[in-house]
Image (cartoon, grey):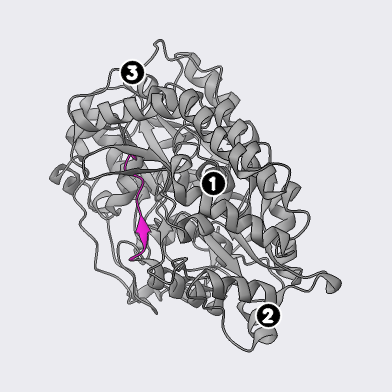
């Protein structure tokens, strides 16, 4: 199950970056105090092959099948008799393992029987620093500025620090020789992580960590299919922009206080569901590359202007909730739950919200082409974070990789069950689908954040059964798996990409003013030229150089 939206650094941070033209890994303004002892990194002339993907096929049969893109569904946890062993032999080397991880819950008690239990099974003692999401950037900067770096450090792929290639090169181990290509087969659970997730951990041509897997879908237009069908008599399956407009008009009733869409406001500007509507109009996923190799940013395309004009039309029709320019994500979720709004752009994990009132069903609008052609969906980083290892000896690296291999045990394995349920009669009672966490287990297991160091590929399964929600999420993934649009510069490094915040905000402001009727399209076109001169040309040159060198 994927992460829900959280305070501070969260999935919404990533979505905002995609919506407003921020380059993946840039997190402009984040960790500004971090110093890695250098300026722009030298672009590598070589690039390590991504780890070979070797899916594990053992274990219980899912209720709905998956693949390296679509998550399989398990309505309940398997019986003990169905579990298999994914790790054999000695795990770690017996020494202490320190770690630095983000958390969105209260930290576990200091006397942690769960970490002690897992430590005994993995032959190590865990000494983890749990950092709240809303202060992760500043504490990460403080940690990396000194020389007291833990053994394993979590890098958030949606909020990478400034000068991260230099930081990784200076203080963390290049894992390419251990994980690149077939070398990863020494760690079968790591080889079971889909290829797309590893791209976020390959920085400037080198593999620097083990990713925490997520499905590759960047975002989803979450909807209330139950209410839409009640109001229109049909499931929400628009096939072009005109059908989508009619759907929005049909469910909007301003007198009743009901609106089709809620966008979201924030410090970077307004998100008018850019990722969904932009993909509909053929706006690139950040950049597009011509057959001759020329890069064009989405802000510079005619499709961006078409999309803005369409959004302006919807705003003028009263389709958007009037609070959209300043609406917080948490409030939009409330509006979805109570039926005030019937669509809202969010991360795919929003479809698995176990806190929703009983009886409410959410689904996703399957993307479509504005002119009726094939839909598109932006591909995300396919990871939440990656675990980097500080520089150490080859023997120590192999030991830590064996540990991460254990922590990456797949769903349906005995190790995965242990990592989520702890010790029987201490952290849980019962077995298989009837296993229930004790009060001690509830206090310690999730809060211990071991899954932030490493975890198996995520599947669609929840502790609280929400079968229809799981089915809805799976159906959306199946329908959109062939629509994914990659960002061609993913995995390549542009030193200028981390210093574009000012230019991005200025451009976003012009676009927002146009939608709200405060300016005209000529101002947006002028804003494009200003943005290109201030940010686009620099990034284009640097990405092009990296792509030429690294292929």
Task: Identify which residue, 158 or 279, lies in the foreground.
Answer: 279
* Cα–Cα span, label 1 and label 3: 27 Å
Q: Residues within 10 Å of mark 1 (few under 14, many from 20)?
A: many
User: Circle 1 — which element?
Assistant: helix
Please give the residue where the numbered disc 2 appears in the rendered image. Answer: 227
Q: Position of residue 450 (x, y in %)?
A: 47, 45
Please give the residue where the numbered disc 3 appears in the rendered image. Answer: 41
Q: Are marks 2 and 1 in contact (CB under 8 Å)?
A: no
Residue stretch rendered in magenta on the structure: 482-490
Q: Position of residue 254 (x, y in %)?
A: 81, 70
Magenta segment includes 488? yes
User: Circle 2 — which element?
Assistant: helix
Please give the residue where the numbered disc 1 appears in the rendered image. Answer: 19
**What residue do we see at 68% from left, 74% from top?**
249
Relative height, residue 165 to residue 339 (above, below) = above
Magenta segment includes 232? no
Which of disc 3 and disc 2 is earlier in sequence?
Answer: 3
Task: Look at the image and tell me in which quarter the C terminus lies.
Answer: top left
Which residue is outermost to the front?
522
Q: Position of residue 315 (x, y in %)?
A: 70, 58
Question: In the drawing, what numbered circle is on residue 472?
Answer: none
* Cα–Cα span, label 2 and label 3: 52 Å
Relative height, residue 307 to residue 127 (above, below) = below
Q: Are marks 1 and 3 in contact (CB under 8 Å)?
A: no
């Amino acid at each position: 199950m994927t992460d829900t939206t959280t305070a501070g650094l969260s999935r919404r941070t990533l979505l905002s970056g995609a919506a407003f033209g921020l380059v993946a890994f840039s997190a402009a303004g984040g960790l500004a105090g971090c110093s890695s002892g250098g300026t722009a990194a030298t672009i590598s002339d070589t690039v390590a092959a991504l780890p070979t993907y070797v899916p594990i096929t053992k274990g219980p049969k899912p209720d709905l099948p998956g693949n390296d893109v679509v998550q399989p569904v398990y309505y309940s946890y398997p019986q003990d008799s169905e579990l298999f062993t994914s790790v054999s032999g000695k795990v770690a080397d017996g020494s202490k393992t320190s770690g630095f991880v983000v958390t969105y819950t209260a930290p576990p008690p200091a006397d942690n029987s769960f970490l002690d239990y897992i430590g005994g099974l993995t032959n190590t003692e865990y000494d983890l620093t749990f950092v709240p999401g809303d202060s992760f950037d500043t504490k990460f900067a403080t940690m990396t500025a000194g020389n007291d770096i833990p053994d394993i450090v979590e890098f958030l792929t949606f909020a990478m620090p400034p000068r991260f290639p230099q930081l990784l090169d200076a203080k963390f181990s290049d894992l390419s020789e251990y994980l690149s290509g077939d070398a990863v087969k020494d760690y079968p659970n790591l080889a079971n992580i889909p290829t797309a997730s590893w791209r976020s951990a390959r920085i400037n041509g080198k593999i620097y960590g083990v990713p925490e897997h997520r499905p590759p879908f960047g975002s989803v237009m979450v909807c209330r299919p139950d209410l839409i069908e009640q109001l229109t008599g049909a499931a929400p399956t628009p096939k072009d922009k005109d059908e989508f407009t009619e759907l929005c008009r049909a469910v909007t009733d301003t007198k009743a206080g009901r609106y089709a869409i809620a966008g979201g406001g924030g410090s970077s500007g307004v998100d008018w569901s850019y990722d969904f509507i932009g993909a509909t109009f053929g706006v690139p996923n950040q950049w597009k590359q011509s057959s001759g190799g020329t890069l064009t940013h989405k802000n510079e395309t005619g499709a961006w202007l078409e999309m803005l004009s369409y959004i302006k039309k919807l705003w003028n029709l009263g389709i958007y909730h009037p609070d959209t320019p300043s609406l917080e994500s948490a409030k939009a979720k409330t509006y979805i739950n109570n039926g005030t709004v019937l669509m809202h752009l969010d991360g795919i994990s929003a479809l698995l919200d176990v806190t929703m009132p009983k009886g409410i069903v959410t689904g996703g609008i399957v993307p479509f082409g504005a002119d009726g052609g094939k839909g598109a969906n932006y591909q995300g980083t396919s990871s939440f974070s990656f675990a980097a290892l500080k520089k150490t000896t080859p023997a120590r690296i192999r030991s830590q990789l064996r540990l991460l291999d254990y922590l990456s045990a797949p769903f349906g394995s005995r190790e995965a069950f242990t990592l989520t349920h702890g010790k029987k009669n201490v952290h849980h009672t019962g077995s298989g689908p009837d296993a229930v966490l004790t009060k001690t287990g509830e206090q310690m297991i999730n809060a211990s954040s071991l899954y932030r160091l490493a975890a198996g590929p995520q599947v669609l399964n929840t502790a609280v059964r929400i079968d229809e929600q799981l089915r809805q999420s799976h159906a959306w993934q199946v329908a959109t798996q062939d629509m994914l649009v990659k960002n061609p510069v993913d995995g390549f490094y542009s030193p200028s990409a981390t210093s574009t915040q000012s230019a991005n905000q200025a451009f976003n402001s012009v676009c927002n003013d146009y939608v709200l009727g405060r300016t005209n399209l000529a101002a947006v076109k002028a804003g494009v030229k200003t943005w290109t001169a201030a940010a686009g040309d620099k990034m284009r040159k640097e990405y092009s150089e990296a792509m030429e060198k690294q292929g």
